[in-house]
Image (cartoon, rainbow, N blue to C red):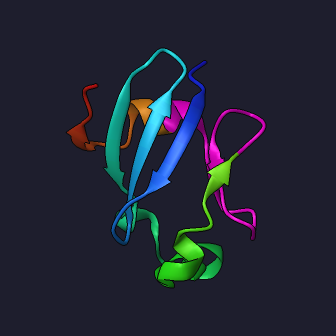
Amino acid sequence: MDKVISVKPLQTYLLEIGFEDGFRKVIDIKPFIERGISAALKDENYFHQVALEDGGGITWPNGFDFCPNFLRDDVPAVNVVTA
């Protein structure tokens, strides 16, 4: 299982995600923001409240979350970050 060890909000809907093995990428989560619980992320201040989750994923205060394997394997990278 992949584990996210860092998450940094960039401009609206973009996140820089760092994984335990050193891989990092920038992802766009806008396609996952619709109605219901995810709608809160449309507010830029709320979007920036993203945090690491105990299970290795990312989450927001309302419980909306992404599992680390989904972030690594299924969400396309806008950019792969190199050190």
Q: Quadrant of residue 17?
A: top left
The answer to if 60 sits in the magenta stretch is yes
Query: From the viewer's perspective, is 54 left or right of 49?
Result: right
Q: Is residue 16 above or below residue 33?
A: above
* Residue located at (54% from left, 68% from top): 48
Q: Say left or right for 18 vs 82.
A: right
Residue 63: x %, y % from top left: 75, 62
Q: Residue at x 28, y 25 (%)?
A: 83
Q: Compared to 44, does 54 lie above or below? A: above
Residue 4 position, x and y percent, is 57, 33
Quarter where residue 2 is shown: top right
Q: Quadrant of the N terminus?
A: top right
In the image, the segment drawn in magenta is 53-70
Which residue is at the far front? 83
Magenta-drawn stretch contains 39: no
Q: Residue furthest top?
A: 21
**Residue 8 in the image: x percent, y percent?**
47, 51
Q: Is residue 17 left or right of residue 63?
A: left
Q: In the picture provided, is 82 more to the left or to the right than 63?
A: left
Looking at the picture, how far across and down is residue 40, in whole percent? 59, 81
63 or 34, which lies in front?
A: 63
Q: Main secondary structure of the magenta part?
A: loop
Residue under the image location 60 percent in, 60 percent down: 50
Count of picture labels: 0
